[in-house]
Image: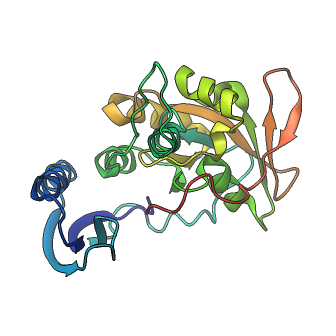
């Protein structure tokens, strides 16, 4: 999401003694499929087996290498008043999927993680449009963390329209039931983009062509007032400040 093209990946496995072979095969097969989809080659790795009880089944670590031909840094130095804030799809699915699985919660609607490789989507945007100034994946801390980090210490702020932030109905319902803000939930397949106002519709159209961006939306604008703050225009017409997430909803998993 800084504009690089990923090429190669390493994979290190820490395996607990007694791990079912079928589980390991399922993980490795999934890695192979995803690497092919992302046009990335897994080129090296290592395995360590530790005694039973010293590892929660299977731990993995990866490291990636790529080239930097697309984004020219995308460091955000050119962000200015009026730039559009886009998100590539509905937020909060990953956080709710992991939370419900770990806590053993059961709902009529089964929510699956949004986990996905974003590089095919982003490469099409960066090669076929101009005006993308900044991108981040909205992982731990979600949309709130991304936007508050964007404006922190800067001469600009951000205004987000709550009604334009895409959230699935089932995710929204669970958030209301459990008291979560969807904008604080983790995502693994969503990207936030800051785009020049004149290019916003072009970038939005390119996102929506791709399966992973079909529900992309413009959710707000960069503002030259309220520097360093992210404000949310609520459904009832008020304005609230979007705070950086405090604490963690889930133990760190990546």
Question: Which residue occupies 51% across, 34% down?
Answer: 105
- Taking the spot 55% from the left edge, 37% from the top edge, the residue there is 200
Q: Quadrant of the C terminus?
A: bottom left
Total of numbered circles in the picture? 0
Position of residue 184 in the picture relative to residue 237 (left or right): left
Which quadrant of the view contains residue 125?
Answer: top left
Compare residues 163 and 179 and report the one nearer the observer.
Answer: 179
Image coordinates of residue 14 in percent, x first then y, are 25, 75
- Figure coloring: rainbow
Residue 58 lies, with reference to residue 201, above or below; the image says: below
**Left or right of residue 10, residue 254 in this image:** right
Apparent side of residue 72 relative to residue 42 in the rendered image (left or right): right
Foreground: 169 or 37? 169
Write down the quadrant of residue 228 in the picture: bottom right
At x 40%, y 40%, the residue is 113
As drawn, is 75 to the left or to the right of 31? right
Residue in view at x 49 percent, y 32 percent: 216
Q: Which residue is more in the foreground, 196 or 223?
A: 223
In which quadrant of the rendered image does the N terminus lie? Answer: bottom left
As rendered, which of 102 and 196 lies closer to the eye? 102
| Residue 168 seen in this snapshot | no
Instruction: Give above or below for 153 relative to 127.
Output: below
Q: Position of residue 212 (x, y in %)?
A: 36, 36
**For residue 51, which quarter of the picture?**
bottom left
Residue 154 coordinates in the image, percent (x, y)? 77, 65
Where is residue 16? Give x, y as percent: 24, 71
Visible in this render: residue 190? yes
């Amino acid at each position: 999401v800084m504009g690089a093209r990923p090429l190669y990946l390493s994979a290190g496995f820490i395996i607990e003694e007694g791990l079912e072979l079928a589980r390991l095969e399922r993980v490795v097969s999934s890695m192979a499929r995803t690497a092919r989809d992302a046009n990335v080659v897994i080129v090296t790795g290592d395995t360590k087996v530790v005694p039973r009880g010293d590892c929660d089944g299977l731990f993995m670590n990866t490291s990636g290498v790529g080239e930097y031909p697309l984004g020219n840094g995308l460091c955000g130095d050119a962000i200015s008043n009026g730039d559009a804030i886009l998100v590539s799809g509905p937020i909060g699915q990953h956080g709710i999927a992991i939370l419900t699985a770990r806590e053993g919660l059961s709902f009529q609607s089964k929510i699956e993680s949004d986990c996905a490789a974003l590089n095919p989507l982003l490469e099409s945007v960066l090669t076929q449009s101009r005006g993308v100034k900044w991108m981040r994946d909205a992982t731990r801390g979600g949309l709130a963390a991304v936007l508050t980090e964007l404006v922190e210490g800067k001469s600009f702020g951000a205004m987000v329209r709550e009604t334009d932030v895409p959230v699935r109905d089932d995710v929204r319902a669970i958030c209301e039931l459990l008291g979560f803000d969807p904008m604080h939930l983790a995502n693994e397949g969503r990207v936030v983009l800051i785009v020049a106002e004149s290019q916003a519709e072009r970038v939005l159209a390119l996102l929506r062509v791709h399966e992973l961006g079909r529900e992309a939306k413009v959710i707000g604008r960069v503002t030259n007032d309220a520097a360093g703050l992210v404000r949310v225009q609520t459904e009832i017409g008020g304005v609230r400040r979007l705070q950086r997430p405090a604490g963690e909803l889930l133990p760190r998993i990546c």
